[in-house]
Image (cartoon, coloured by chain):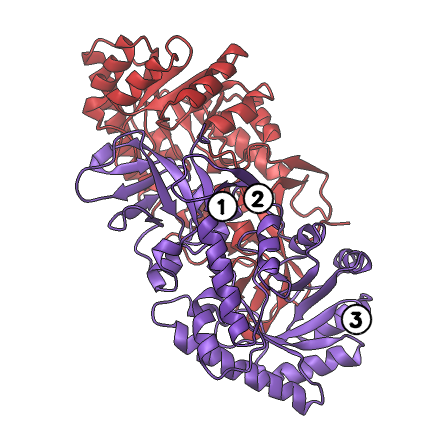
Chain colours: A purple, B red
Amino acid sequence: MAPSTPYLAVDLERMQANIARAAEAATARGIALRPHAKTHKTIEIGRMQVAAGAHGLTVATIGEAEAFAAAGLDDLFIAFPLWIDGKRAARLSHLVAAGAAISMGVDSVEGAERMARAGLAGRVGARVEVDVGHHRSGCAPERAGDVAVAAARAGIDVEGVFAFPGHAYAPDARAEAARQEAAGLRAAADAMRSAGLEPMVVSGGSTPSFAAALEIDSPVTELRPGVSVFGDAQQWELGTIDPTAIALTAHATVVSHAGGRMVLDAGSKVLGPDRAAWASGHGRLLDHPEARIAQLSEHHAVVELPGELPPLGSRVRVVPNHVCMAVNLVDELHVFDRGDDELPSTRWRVAARGRND
Amino acid sequence: MAPSTPYLAVDLERMQANIARAAEAATARGIALRPHAKTHKTIEIGRMQVAAGAHGLTVATIGEAEAFAAAGLDDLFIAFPLWIDGKRAARLSHLVAAGAAISMGVDSVEGAERMARAGLAGRVGARVEVDVGHHRSGCAPERAGDVAVAAARAGIDVEGVFAFPGHAYAPDARAEAARQEAAGLRAAADAMRSAGLEPMVVSGGSTPSFAAALEIDSPVTELRPGVSVFGDAQQWELGTIDPTAIALTAHATVVSHAGGRMVLDAGSKVLGPDRAAWASGHGRLLDHPEARIAQLSEHHAVVELPGELPPLGSRVRVVPNHVCMAVNLVDELHVFDRGDDELPSTRWRVAARGRND
């Protein structure tokens, strides 16, 4: 019997094609791929990415690192400027003692010195985070040398520099964000070299900027796309992924025709409430591209759809706006070998769900 | 040792005061309180609400009903127009057979007839959902009689009518939404009576409209506020709750001062990404009311704060915009007897987390 709605369904055939496509594109240009596993948080998917050629995984938290390392996926970069206290140092040391190769982000001299004081020198590598235009964490590119030197003086192995061009998440922003990423990372790598340190890794990121980063003259040696494994409505609307490649949907039931609209039993607690200012609505319907999700509550999606509405009790496939948020809401993914199969062939546990710390 | 950030912290003293305040306000006007447990999803909190006088709990899904019923909190209203299939009918029947008193929402003749065909007549009660202005699910108030009659003819016990005035979630909208709720529910109750059925329950909802609904001439016999148990940044900014009563925060660490702003390790995967158009930002800082969360990613909050920034490594308390979304992201709540205690006294499991179906 099909599971009760709402649930998240993976289209295995599409997902495997997405994994292969990203790996081939990077390999063809001699770029290492280190996919961001925060998107799927799932061991089985991480294994497929590594089998397809990924040089390890990216994670956002120590908890995610623990979940993947426990399954043997233990070449991990924590792309976050962790503030190291005794508990975090102990957890990282434990991972390394068990054989994991771990590096983490650092964006300040204080952060680098703290890593060393907590006993992580010689155990956990560091990559200096630089801000290339997203204006979140990350030091200015020209300051990367100072941070790297502070870390190196404290005995930390400084692997290189990294950035996240999150400002690529906007219409027509991808190419310019990729250019800014390349320029910022080049300046950061130069700053390290001027300080007498050679960056072994120059790491960029983001699904929307991925293709552009491969096309331009860029210093990146590694890329960290996350969302591309599934795609989502944001990438569909940005033009980064074709809807025929979207590999994750929420299966939902039409429960009401109130007000002449279609009300689904999938709300923000399974789709995630993300809605960028430029989004057409709160997600899309995979099989009804003309539909708009006009209103989203925790357990309701209100859909405007021209013409006759699907009857009450019908099932529809909803594409979340931001798939990373949707996956983090559920304990398991239902895996369909092909998207139009009636029944899932298996379920995967979202092993790193909720691992925020 | 304090838990590693980010985590959700409950201020027990404040929460108990919020529970008592809501119970007293309703009781003083002879209104039954049936708090919406989707906000907290936690057995311990549901028990406190019932001990304070709540006439059972409201839930949104069968899964939530199962979680609370398993702990003996089994007088439950599922405030959603469930589409009953064989699996859902079996789960509801199982709950009732184990002694639970369950009623559910219905907003169409088809939905009512389907309940009966699935064998729920005599087992699960129904309340007719009407739309009083939020325009989500719910039939027009004047159609409540038709739906009620269809259900009653099919043998379903029709307890009454209910509405959710979600349009109260906007600045200066509370009083008008409460008036519309009263008018819509009165029309719906009248439609039932005209059809020869007496509504035993006339149920309204929502934290922002709660106080207004108690003050005006309203037909409600029951109210279902959810958020008021904790409060959140939305209610703070709507003026529904004073910041001194907010009982849930995310404890976060300052990890970066990049760009002269304060970057915290609490992002949308612990705060929830909800941001209403009228919100000042992506949440508030309980101890820095002048701060604004200008940017939110999955694991970063970027805070603009005039004056000197708290040093790297400081801990701050973040009030999520929409607390129901935050709680549903974590597996447990850390309970502090008083908000300024250094260590939690216990942890509560978020027993119904992720129970979407």
Residue B286, percent from left and from top:
56, 53
Q: Secondary structure at mark 1?
A: loop
Dot 3: within a 10 Å radius of its alpha carbon, few (fewer than 14), some, or many (20 or more) residues?
many
Quick check: marks 1 and 2 in contact, CB under 8 Å?
Answer: yes
Q: Position of residue A330 (x, y in %)?
A: 53, 41
* Residue B69 lies in quadrant: top right
Which residue is found at the position 52% from the left and 60% from the top? Answer: A226
Please tell me which residue lies in front, B81 or B177. B81
Please name which of the two marks, 3 or 2, marks the residue nearer to the observer: 3
Is circle 3 on the same chain as circle 2? no
* Total marks placed: 3
Give a yes or no on whether discs 3 and 1 share a subunit: no
Decide: is B35 above or below A48: above
| Residue at mark 2 | B248
Taking B88 as reference, is B229 above or below it? below
Mark 2 belongs to chain: B
> Closer to the observer: label 3 or label 1?
3
- Chain of the residue where label 3 is placed in the rendered structure: A
Q: Which residue is mark 3?
A: A116
Question: What secondary structure is marked by label 2?
Answer: strand
Helix, strand or loop status at disc 3: helix
Write down the residue under mark 1. B232
Q: Is residue A228 visible?
A: yes
For the residue pair A298 and B317, the one nearer the viewer reads as A298
